[in-house]
Structure formats: structure tokens, C-alpha cells
Amino acid sequence: MSPSAKPVSGPAAIPRGRLVAAVTVAGLLLTALFCLAEPGLVRLADNRILDGLASHMAQGPAPDRVVIVDIDEESLSAAGQWPWPRYLTGGIVRRVAAARPLGVGVDILFSEPDRTSIATIRSAFRRDFGLDIAITGVPRGMEDNDSYFGGVLAGAEAVGAVMHLFDLVIPDPENLPRPVHVTGETTAIDPAEATGILCNAGPIQAGLASSGFINVEKDEDGSIRRVPLLHRFQGQYYPSLALALFMQARNLRQLRVETDALGPVLVAGDARIPVDRGARMRLRFDGGARAHRFVSAADVLRGAHDPALFEGRMVIVGSSAARLNDLHHTPVSANYPGTEVHAVALDNLFDGNHLRSPEHAAAYRFIPAALVTVLAGLLFLRAGPLQAGGATLAVAMVMPAVGSALFLWRGIAMPMAAPVMAALAQGALLSLALYAREQRMAYVRLLQLNHARQMTLESMTAVAESRDEISGAHIKRTQHYVRALAEALRDIGRGGGRETYPQLTEDYIELLFHSAPLHDVGKVAVPDSVLFKPGKLTDEEYVVIRQHVRHGRNIIANAAQGMEDDAFLHLAAEIAWSHHEKWDGSGYMEGLAGETIPLSGRLMALADVYDALICARQYKPAFPHAKVREMILQGRGTHFDPAVVDAFLLAEEEFKTIAETYRDTEPRPVSAPGLSGAEMQPGDPRQ
């Protein structure tokens, strides 16, 4: 018999260099996607890093340039429900202005007329009831709270608040705020375009020296890190409250736009204010929430404050009361008062120690990330995944280290996360790709090993067949008989609701199938005169031929030396040694009986006998299936395991199919004198 196993074929593993190059190109495309097209995830990671650095910077000394007059919970409880009568707020502004501050800002929008004004009440009674009521003893100018408040604001040269609208179009207000004149490279900035402005009631708006919007902008994660300094409305530029206060204090009326290597800069007098293209300034938080000096509005109303606190400082009147819903998430606090956000912006404008982000942040993200991606490919070409991944990550960490230094020392907020994310992602992609390649190579090597093993198996079997009168089809038939018996026995064992033969797993049955061909390999050591003798053997010849089981076990054991966990050769040796044992103990070589005979030997015993009887041999003719069936039943409980005989009966039709499918193509003639059915006994050593 010639070996029938076909050489292993299939797609070879991609060369390592080509695989690394392909993954590197894919990594570059992914890097471009995340850094240029969809930067949200990378930007979020950058913000987390910068937030940590900002929190570290906030541990410095608390600012002292801006004081906040706070309408806090205590003030609301002391003065009654909100909104207060305008004369109360006017009283606060009047007392603050008397202390000669550098500037006064009001971070509250009074868009509706004060319904507690005497003039408003008289007008309502006249309209609703036709009554003209008279209220005497009211000081001049106090009949209209809004007019009174407007007069106080005018005397304080206060800067008030307006709200810019971006989803509603409203008519022009009665007193449109004064825009700021912007010159220079105005194409370098593109502030948000408002569709409307919500202003204070007419007398209040008229009393303001200037106005600034109080809109804040939150990043994608809901945190405030930047504030807009300019918006546009109807082609004009309008300042934020902080910028308006700064310009009022410096007596400035215009801004100039310039650009430098990092982006646009607003020039206000001798101050240079870096902004992004949306005219937004990045905030430097010096201290956590409530790091500024807060003075309770209730204390100011009672005169219980120290006027020296306001002298020469910027004062913002606002609120930190939770019920007024003006608390925000920032890098240094999850509940940061909106008024204090404007105070931080004002501090930053005055001290000039700005944080800034480079204009082309996407490029600053992509270029180092792309370099790290390419570097990862080069390293993975020359080193193992662990070493290459570690080296790539170490190089990628240079960017966060440099970026952190620039942020802490120069206030430049460089993107830092992209190289690290690229290193992690590319390292993972390359490791997975190389792992998959190694697995593919290991799989191919395993196939090649199995192929070599099968070739060895078939070669050993061919040697055995060359010393026997058995055709090549015998190997196929016994293989399939054994498997059919094992599967039938497994099914019988499951009939009682439990596994009688738990060892009959799919893997074990497959091993049986591959091990069965070596059951008679020991016949290579049997002399021709005995092996090919027609007719019955003498007792001496019988002793010689049955030694083939010992020779078979030794041959297989020698072949298995040096092979780790070669289960199929172990099982083949077990079959070769035990397949001539008999259930009643009368077999050889050890005279094992019952279940002390390995299950593989019990199965092979019946399969081998069936094939020997059903096929013609040099010393016997072929017997019909019915005759063979009768002979096997006669051997039940003596030669064969009764359970294996039951399995044979269950798989009987399959045995017939196997015998027909793999029948000998060139039957050998029987040499006279051949054995008859009466003379031929199951278990003849030549089987």
C-alpha cells in the first residue's frame, strides 16, 4: 500500500514585513480618521490630561483682583423671593461704587420691568380698575424702580449683562448695546453669529456705561474650559461681560486682531489676549471653586461689610445660589458659580498670564501620532511584540511629557493624547496581526506535522501489509468498523440516561480511527513461512506468529520516543498489544479478561475478526455476512465483549456498507487447501 495522505496545501502566511506594512498603513488611516475627521474621542482624552494639569495649577495662591458680591442663599432668605425690587440691587451697587472700585459689573439680566415699582402699580390699577391711586411720601426718583436702578448704574459707570440668542430672532431692543470696534486681521477669527440680543429693561440698559454678554460655552463633555470674548450680531462685534469690564477699566474702545505662530491674538491696548478662531479664551483657574473673595449681598445691604474690600478692585455683582441654577462643571470643580467664571476670565485678562491652544490642533494631533504609528511598524519588524510595544509607548510618552512642561511653564495647551492612543492602538493591532500570523504558521506547521505523522503511519502500515496477504482496503475498512462500533457503543451507553462509556468522546473516537491501521504492524517480524502458510498452523508456528503483538507494541513505542503527547501512537500501541485478548481470558499475550482488556482492544478485536472473515485470504475464502454474523454471535461473552457485540448488531448495516464501499479491487485467489468455515476460528493470529 502506498501512502495516501496528500501534501498540505493552502495559503501561506503573509511575510512579516508585508503584514507589518499593511497594518501600519491601516493604522495611519485610522489615526487620520480619529485626529482629523472625528477628533472627539482624542479631544476628550486631551481635555482629561489638561484638566489634571489645570487642577495642579489651581493649587497656587488665590486671586485677589476681583471681588464678588454674592446674592447667596442667605441673601435670598433675608430679602425675600427673587427677583428682588430693583432698589435693593441698586442699593448694593450704590454701596459698592461708594468704595471707589476699579470697575463694577452686574452679572444679572433685568429684562422685565420691575412690577413692584410704584409707577407700575399705579398704572396697573388705572388699567385694570379705573382707579387713580395716590401714594405720598415717596422720595423723588423712587416712583420707578427701574429708573432709580438705571440712575445708580449710571453713577457707578457700571457694566451690565446681556444675553445673546442663537435660535430666536427678536426685534431690536430699545437700547441696543454699544458694539466694539475691531480692526486688523479680522479674517483670522470667526466668532459665533447671534440672531438676537436680550437686553435689560429700557431705563436700566440706558444707565449702563457698557454691556457684555454673559453666555458661556461648554465643551462636548459639558465642562467649561473656554469663554467667548466676542460674538457678532448684524455685522458688529460685541464683547463678553469680562472683556467689557476690562475695556471699561482700561478706557479702551477698540480691539485689533493679530496672528502669531499659534493662532489669533486680540490686542487691547498693551494687552495681548490669545484666542482660538471662535474668539474664545482658554481659562486659567487659579484656585478651585470660590477661590475669589465672596461678600454676601445681605452684608452689603446691612452695611456689615468692609468697604476697603472693594477699593481699587473689580467688583462683580452676581449669584452663587443653587436655586438660581447658575452652577457649572469646570476642570477644578463640578459646581462652579457662573459669576466666578466671569471673574476668572477677568483675572486672566488683567494678569496677561494666558493659557492658549494652538490653532491647528488637528495637525498637532495627527503628525506625532502618525510618526508613532510608523515607528511602531519599524520596531515590530525588528523586535518581539512586548519589546516593540514597550519601546513605542515609551517614545509616545515623550509628547505628553513635553506637552505637560509647555502647559505648566508657558501655558500652551498642546494636544497630548493622540500619540499615546496611537501607540496603544497600533501596538494592539500589530500584536494581534502578528499573533494571528504566528497562529496561522503554527496551524500550517501542525497540518504539516499531522501530514508527516499520517505519512509515517501509512508507511508503517504499508510495511506491515507488504508482509501480509491483506489488501490496502483492509486499513480503510477496519478504521471505519472501529469508529462505527465505538459510536454505536456510545449510543447504547447513553440509553440509560447516563454515560456508561464516558471515554468515548469525539476526540477519543477520532484517535481510534487514526490508530487502528497499526494494529498488525508487528507482522513485519514474522517469518514468511508462517505468515503466508496456507491451512492451519502448528503449535510452534502459533507461538511464533502471536509474537507479532509484542513486536507491534515495541515498534510503535520506538516510533513514539521523543514525541510529546502523541496520543494516537500510545493508543496504537495499546491496540496492537491487546486486540488478540479475549473476553473469557483465553487470548494473548497477557490473558486479560473482561474489562481489564482495554476498550480499544475489545473494539479492534471484533472489527479485525469481521474483516478477516468477510474477505478472502491466502488461507481461506470470503464468508458471507450472515455466516460472519453467526460466528461473532457465537463468540459473544467468550471471545468478544457482549456490549461490543450489541454495538455490532446496532451498526450491522453500516458494517455492510463499509465492506461494500472499501471492498478489495483485486481479490486474491485462495490457495488450496484453504480453511473452511468449520476450521476457521475467530482469532486466528493471521487475521
Image (tube, grey):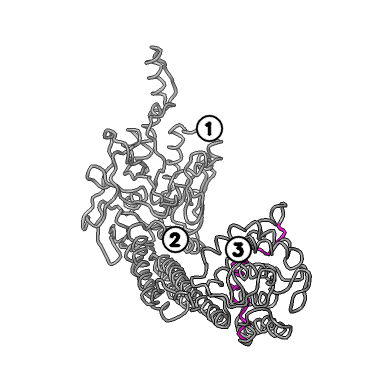
Dot label at residue 624: 3
C-alpha gap between disc 1 and disc 3: 113 Å
Identified by mark 2, the residue type is Ala
Q: Magenta part of the protein: which range?
A: 499-525
* Residue type highlighted by circle 3: Pro
**Considering the numbered disc 1 on the image, is that residue within a helix, a strand or a loop?**
loop
Q: Which residue is mark 2?
A: 45
In which quadrant of the rendered image does the C terminus lie?
bottom right
**Residue 289 placed where, x, y %?**
51, 53
The residue lying toward the viewer, choosing from 72 and 298, is 72
Can residue 408 be seen?
no
Which residue, given by chain and number where applicable, does mark 1 sit on? 80
Quadrant of the rendered image containing residue 398 = bottom left
**Label located before the other in sequence (2 or 1):** 2
In percent of width and height, residue 28 lies at 35, 67
Residue 404 lies in the magenta stretch: no
Q: CA distance from mark 2 to mark 1?
A: 45 Å
Residue 14 visible in image = yes
At numbered mark 2, what does the secondary structure look like: helix, strand or loop?
helix
Tag 1: amino acid: Gly
> Which residue is rendered at x = 32% and y = 43% of the image?
209
Q: Is residue 33 left or right of residue 420?
A: left
Disc 3 residue crowd, few under 14, some 14–19, many 20+, Cα 10 Å: few
Q: Quadrant of residue 205?
A: top left
- For the residue carrying disc 2, how many other residues have a C-alpha within 10 Å: few (<14), some (14-19), or many (20+)? some
